[in-house]
Image (cartoon, rainbow, N blue to C red):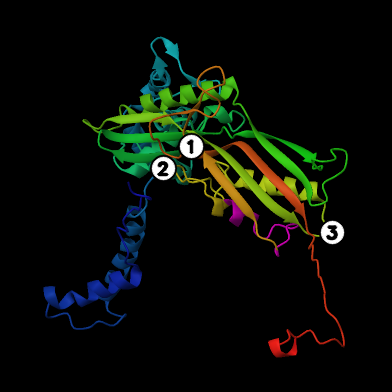
Amino acid sequence: MADELRLPDLAPEGYAEIFEALRNAIPTFSSNWTDYNASDPGITLLQLLAWVGEATAYRVDRVPDASFHNFLLMAAGVPEQGVEQALLTAQRDIVKRGLVTITLGGQPVLMDPAYVELLRYLVSILGQDVDAAQMHAVAQRYWSSPYRAVTREDFEALSLQCSASVPDTAPFDKVMRAFVHRQEAGVRVTIVSGYVPLYSLKFAKSYTTTTPAEPDPAMYGTLTVSATPPSFSSLNGYDKLVYAVGAFLAPRQLIGTAVSVEAARFTPLVATVDLVVARGYDGETVLRAAAASLIALTDPLKGGSDGDGWTYGQPLLEHDLLAALGGLPGIDPSFPLVAQVDALNGTRVGDAAVGVTTVVESPPYDAGFPWFVSLTLRALYSTWTIQVGVHGRVAMDTRIPFEEDA
């Protein structure tokens, strides 16, 4: 769809261009007219006509305000007297599941929000003189709003438009990102709401195993990061979003195109990181900063290398953790960082069943978003332990004797 609406320049000529064209046309109509000086009455008449032509062309090249108003009414498909009734009808065209109205952010989901916005503007300017520039902006915004879902960009834009009016104070009811994948059965749309996994952090000092009361001279401590289960509101919000986006896309998709809408998945991970705290830094502070960096990296909305959210379906690997912690103040760069990431691809069976280590494999899915079920960061002291042993004798022949010298 066009990005802007440009009006043609209907009269680019001014007074000088019009007069020159009239004067140059004299030989075409009369061979007896040979005096082209300004003193000639005919030339004076042509100058007058050029001046009138310039004034007329200026008016022809301008679009009256009433024309913009009529264009908006034509785009809405209603006469001026029927705008209010058309608005009431459009506002009743909402997403429903059976007889239940689907609400996002406390408001019903409009099936055509761009059309409702246009009608609301037309109602607000009834009987008023409105500047043409303002009406042009409204027409351009309506003209540029997507409606038909054909390309991948169309599906993404329409999925976001479904909940565009939901305020940021209700993030669970708002589509923040959308990913479109082509598949054999049609199109699969994965939506991401404002839900972000929450984590709790717990730090503990390390002590020796032989003497539990004494601190471990080699290890500073361990920071354990555990995932907080999602609340009912976030899960319920995803359920409503999936249904609302599916109903919103249904009348816009091409005939024969099967569209499935699903919520974003979070892949459970177990990760460990070993680092060495540089001298002069507090170990707990360094561990908490490292954990914050890793959590920020996997944020579905603001994570990733570009800061616009972790790429959906991209697995989290060890080198991603190392890259996020590289150069972090307080980590001794002279010691290597060690990281390990394991994905839980199945459901763990408890002790009462087969065994605690038994995992029932589930069907393969996309990686989704990283979700730390357990993240353990261990900090070691920055200490080199070097033992140098020197053994030798001075002024003594230590050569192995030959047999004849024995």
Q: Identity of the amino acid at label 1?
A: Asp
Amino acid found under the numbered disc labelled 2? Asp
**Taking 339 as reference, is 245 left or right?**
left
> Which residue in the protein does label 1 denote?
129
**Does the magenta-highlighted stretch encompass residue 203?**
no
Residue 115 in the image, given as x and y percentages of width and height: 39, 30
Mark found first going from the N terminus, 3 or 1: 1
Element class at badge 3: loop
Neighbours of disc 2 within 10 Å: few (<14), some (14-19), many (20+): some
What residue range appears in magenta? Answer: 321-334
Q: Quadrant of residue 105?
A: top right
Instruction: Say which residue appears at 87% left-offset and 42% top-offset.
Output: 214
Q: Position of residue 311 (x, y in %)?
A: 48, 46
- Dominant SS of magenta comes to loop
Q: CA distance from mark 2 to mark 1?
A: 8 Å
37 and 239: which one is in front?
239
Residue 142 shows up from this direction: no
Q: Nearer the viewer, residue 172 or 197?
A: 197
Query: Distance from label 3 to label 2 (Cα)?
Result: 71 Å
Q: Is residue 250 above or below residue 178?
A: above
- Residue contact at pointers 2 and 1, CB within 8 angstroms: yes
Determine crowd level at label 1: few under 14, some 14-19, many 20+ residues with C-alpha closer than 10 A.
few
Report the quarter where the C terminus lies: bottom right
Read off the residue under disc 3: 280
